[in-house]
Image: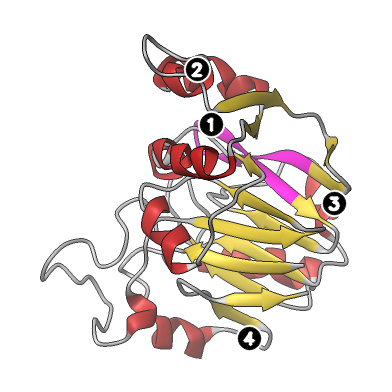
Amino acid sequence: MIVRILGCGGSFGSPLAWNRNGNIDVNNPKNHRTRSSVLININDQNLLIDTSPDLRAQLYNAKCTKIDAVLFTHEHSDHTSGLPDMRAMSLINQSIIPAFLSSDIKKSMIKNYKYIFEGHKDYSPFMSLKTISDNFNIGNTKIETFKHNHGSIDVQTYRINNFAYSTDLKNFYEKDIDKLKDLDLWIVGLLRYDPHPSHAGFDQINEYIKYLKPKKTLFTHMTALLDYEELLSKCYENIEPSYDGMTIEL
């Protein structure tokens, strides 16, 4: 399995805007972050988690011209609004691309992107909706999923073999965190150092890491308040911030 970080920025990206650099060193390319999305190559399939607003450029930089399925974590626009860019993938491969999501967001996704999933006037649909359960398969790939809390809404954590992805994390429910034991790689959201109403802070995320003991942990969904080198200096062994274009082979 090959995991590529397409983007690891928060909803604004990083830096925020021209000359609005937050706390980052803009001369370090690892601080230039597009919105969060990840590409997984496994069993001769390309699985995409979330369709960020920067998706076209992300897939271009990854030299990717085929997506076999998309998994959505939640409906916030920084994780979904790149959906129209999937039209090119559908056209190139002459395929209807399945999108896997929770029943909670199915209605709003159809409302916001009706022409994509159902067609509209001269537009034919180029994606299909698939409602997920706790465990499901895409081809020969088994995927486990459960909800975690993101403030006023829930978000899906996804686990594939010994890899898991948990963006926009505030808290786990009950004993769901135990489903993430024995990981080789955990990619987890870290918006900023201090807690946010919808995101856990640095100390809380580190408590989760200490409990789970994954072999490697990468932070994603980072704002321009987090400088790559400064954050790296605060991290324990086998924990580090990710960066756009980073590739991990498992």
* Rendered position, 41 above or below 157: below
Q: Picture quarter containing residue 154?
A: top right
Looking at the image, is mark 4 or mark 1 earlier in the sequence?
A: 1
**Where is the N terminus found, in terms of image quarters?**
bottom right
Q: Residues within 10 Å of mark 3 (few under 14, many from 20)?
A: some
Q: Mark 4 belongs to which amino acid?
A: Tyr
- Residue under label 2: 110
User: Which quarter of the image is occupied by the C terminus?
Assistant: bottom right
Above/below status of 71 relative to 35: above
Task: Please report whichever mark, 3 or 1, sits nearer to the chain's N-terminal start.
Answer: 1
Mark 3 element type:
helix
Q: Is residue 242 visible?
A: yes
According to the picture, the residue beneath numbered tag 4 turns out to be: 236
> Which residue is farthest top?
121
Q: Residues within 10 Å of mark 2 (few under 14, many from 20)?
A: some
Between the residue at mark 4 and the residue at mark 2, the CA separation in whole angstroms equals 43 Å
Residue 194 visible in the snapshot:
no
Position of 57 with respect to 63 (left or right) is left
Q: Which mark is residue 179?
A: 3
